[in-house]
Image: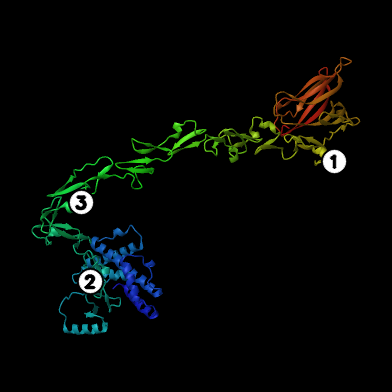
Amino acid sequence: MDLSVVVLLSLCGFLRGQETADPISLDDCCKDGKERGQESQDCTGLPLISESTTCRIAQEQCCTAVLEDSVCTKGINMAKDQGSCDAFLTSSTCETKTTKTCCECCLLGRAAQERGLSCDLTLAVWYQCGLVSRACCVDRSPNSDGKPAPEGQPSQDDTLKTDEQCKAAGCSQSCLNGSCSCLEGYKLKADAKTCEDVNECLLGSHHCHGGERCINTLGSYRCQRVISCGTGYELTDSNKCEDIDECETGTHNCAAELECQNTVGSFRCRPRMQCGVGFIQDALGSCIDINECLSVTGPCPAGHMCFNTVGSYTCQRHSVTCGRGYHLNTDGSRCVDIDECAGPDNSCDGHGCINLVGSYRCECRAGFIFNSISRSCEDINECRNYPGRLCAHKCENILGSYKCSCTTGFKLASDGRNCDDLNECESSPCSQECANVYGSYQCYCRRGYQLSDADGITCEDIDECALPTGGHICSYRCHNTPGSFHCSCPASGYTLGPNGRSCQDTDECVTGTHSCSESESCFNIQGGYKCLNFDCPPNYRRSGDTPRVDRADISRCVKSCQPNDISCVLNPILSVSHTAISLPTFREFSKPEEIVFLRSPTPSHLPHADSPEIVYDILEGNVQSAFDIVKRLDHGMIVGVVRQVKPLVGPVSAVLKLAMNYVTNGVVSHRNIINVHIYVSEFWF
């Protein structure tokens, strides 16, 4: 018996002592587990037959023992049939591993037998593996009981010595030459004294046929057929039930005049001669004519007579002929009037019906007219018979009447014939404003919206900022809103004008929001301000009069030499001036912009010919060559005009150093330096 079963039975004995109150015995629990194991169910998820924990353990362990016996037997059979276990190398499931282990242990036992070694392995293998190996070894040995063959007749002294050894061995079954041995169907346990049952079903050493299940018993086993076939079937080698053809095997009991016909699971005896249509066959196989005229319903229609013939029958019509509106009575002897008005489905199709002898007449409902030829009520097409007189717009004929309808934009009046204008605006078809017109309506939109070209009813927002003139609506940025828009200015340095579109520069110098110190002058530029502090260079002093010229303030320093300072006296620069100007980034630059005017105090009509000529020049700071200076006459005075001749994209800061040269006979006698501080804003406003 398998070790797992022995341990389980011992466990069952222990558990019986622990739980005796459960009405279900542990034997019943184990039996249920074995049955489910035979059905290859999952032993870890069996439906419990008791709330007892010990019963659950017994179910699972008995189920596992059956499954392990089955998978181990499969491996042993593989080793015996094929001599190889390679078929189990492709899978790693628990069942496959157990099958492979039993297969390989059986191969060890067969190898020991082939080499003439002892069937009791001395290898340190798993105990169960040793059992399987020994069983496969013994199964192939000439002396299959595992007992050593006698080599000669022992002497009397040897016999006495052997008896003493057997007594000392304490064998449970038999002793041979001082060594314990077991009866057939048993094997020695590890203590070499006690015998335990050999599970031939587990080891595969049984001789059960296909379709039979091996059941282990103490010292032996028995074969039980798994599938039981009923009468008329036989069990094949493939363990399937197939029908027995009693007619072919001759096991039927049909008489000589009858023919055997096989059926699934049985057979039938049929007469060899089959009767044709119109005959019936008796038990002896004779064919007897069927009298169809004696049937309850009768094969012939009303007004006909039935005459039986051999194997068939004939029908003959009565000789009485009825005219229109009449039919034969039930026995076919005379003609009677047909009541066309009888029943709900009369000939007048729901209209009034009056039966007449041999005929009928219909009384049609309103909207119908009686057709004397077809003898039915036909619908009157009022729309075709009275065109333009029944309905104001459209007339539609219906069964027994007519119906008026109106064209789009109108609704049927209360009289059901005329049409009134439909005020579509009541159903709010337009997204904003609706104006009803006769037979239709017109959608229009509020200011800031326009009617959609797609459906003519939806008002879509006009994106004023995206219009061709959108770039000129706002000075800085335009923000579209539903139905309108609003303008915004840069975050600092500007405020939105009263018109809501223009951006006005904030004069921080006037509002006092600048951060210039007392020693600095605040100069407002577009979008901000600058703190200026112009100091005079050495040997120069600030002029008392600082006139305001155009948009910029001038800080003027004149030469003031110390006594005996010859280099200062010889320096041709008489004055150094500073001025500042703020310019925008011109959005459209098509011609030069005049930005600074330098007026000379010298009149254009000089009193004598040796008066110096004034020449203007740009010394430094001409960024991107964007500036030039030209000389012109203005009201009798010579004026140097500084112009911007190329566009500059701000923000840009530059110091344009200008020279007003006084030239006499081709030599600069003296000059005045003017530093123009130019601040170009990044905006055009």
Q: Position of residue 161 (x, y in %)?
A: 21, 84
Q: Is residue 88 left or right of residue 418?
A: left
Among numbered discs 2 and 3, the one appearing first in the sequence: 2
> What residue would you read off at disc 1?
518
Q: Is residue 71 above or below residue 152?
A: above
Is 489 drawn above or below residue 67 in the view shown?
Answer: above
Q: Quadrant of residue 558?
A: top right
The residue tagged 3 is 298
The three-letter amino acid code for the residue at tag 3 is: Gly
On the rendered structure, is 498 left or right of 445?
Answer: right
| Alpha carbons under labels 2 and 3: distance apart | 69 Å
Q: Amino acid at mark 2?
A: Arg
Q: Position of residue 301 (x, y in %)?
A: 22, 47
Q: Secondary structure at mark 3?
A: loop
Q: Taking 260 as reference, is 12 above or below it?
A: below
Give the total number of marks visible in the rendering. 3
- Residue with the mark numbered 2: 222
Name the secondary structure under disc 2.
strand
* Residue nearer the viewer, 163 or 285: 285
Q: Residue furthest left?
A: 256
